[in-house]
Image (cartoon, rainbow, N blue to C red):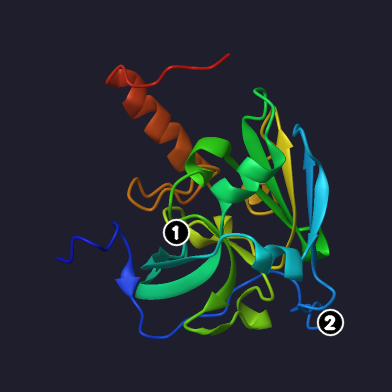
Amino acid sequence: MNARIPPGQVITKGYPILHAGTVPYSLTRENWTLKLSGAIEFPQTLSFADLLAMPQKTVTTDIHCVTSWTKLDTTWVGVPFRSIADRVRPHPNAHFVVMECEQRFTTSLPIEPLMEDTVLIAHTYDNAPLPPEHGGPVRMFVPRRYFYKSAKWLRGLRFVEKDEPGFWEVRGYSNVADPWMETRYDVDDVKVIHRMRKANLFQPTD
């Protein structure tokens, strides 16, 4: 068994295209913007040129889809989320980030995992501009979560105090989305919390 493959996953050599809605082909690098808002000191809107002017990072890592495929050794380029946070200076009560996308799609994560060194605002995949079918011109890239947390066609990052489960989460998918804990659906989240409570590892925040 390959130690890099999370439970229930199988390796794919391709790159399956999966999403709800249609591909927004009219969204381009020329007209793309990213709104940074919410509980931050410096709200602003970035153009694609602004994004390219920020520190860039290349990440090579595996990605995992909730539909059970895993793709090994994918290479992405983008701006580390941490650099975005440094730029806008989140308030102390900004505990979550809502990713806002085309066609009113959203997802969210706590701010702590987004600070990991592999998390990018990604614009390049496999040494080429990120194609529309895979979320281009810009998508979120959070490889340590199931890939629906790497939101396609990213248009906004809103920093909030309380979580706001998004499109897939309110339809029964896990809000944790951890491939190694195999939290695919919301019922899996409950099981994980129960196991953590039994092990005295779960500390509720309110």
Residue 56 higher or lower than 193, as above or below: below
Image quarter of the C terminus:
top right
Front residue (pair 30, 66):
30
Image quarter of the N terminus:
bottom left
What amino acid does circle 2 point to?
Ser
Residue 42 image-quadrant placement: top right
Q: Position of residue 59 (x, y in %)?
A: 42, 66
Q: Position of residue 128 (x, y in %)?
A: 55, 86
Contact, mark 1 vs mark 2 (Cβ under 8 Å): no
Q: Position of residue 150 (x, y in %)?
A: 57, 60
Q: How crowded is mark 2: few (under 14 residues within 10 Å), some or many (20 or more)?
A: few
Q: What element carries label 1?
A: loop
Q: What element carries label 2?
A: loop
Q: Name the residue tied to disc 2.
A: 26
- In the picture, measured across the screen, residue 128 lies left or right of residue 40, that is left
User: Residue 159's mark?
Assistant: none
Which residue does the image show at 49% across and 17% down from the upper left? 204
- In the picture, measured across the screen, residue 173 lies left or right of residue 2, that is right
Which numbered disc, 1 or 2, marks the residue that appears first in the sequence? Answer: 2
Which residue does the image show at 63% across and 35% down from the upper left? 96
| Inter-mark Cα distance, 1 to 2 | 27 Å
Q: Position of residue 92 (x, y in %)?
A: 65, 23
- In the picture, measured across the screen, residue 170 lies left or right of residue 126, that is right
Q: Name the residue tied to disc 1.
A: 143
What amino acid does circle 1 point to?
Pro
Which residue does the image show at 81% across and 42% down from the upper left? 43
As drawn, the residue found furthest toward the left would be 1
Residue 191 higher or lower than 1, as above or below: above
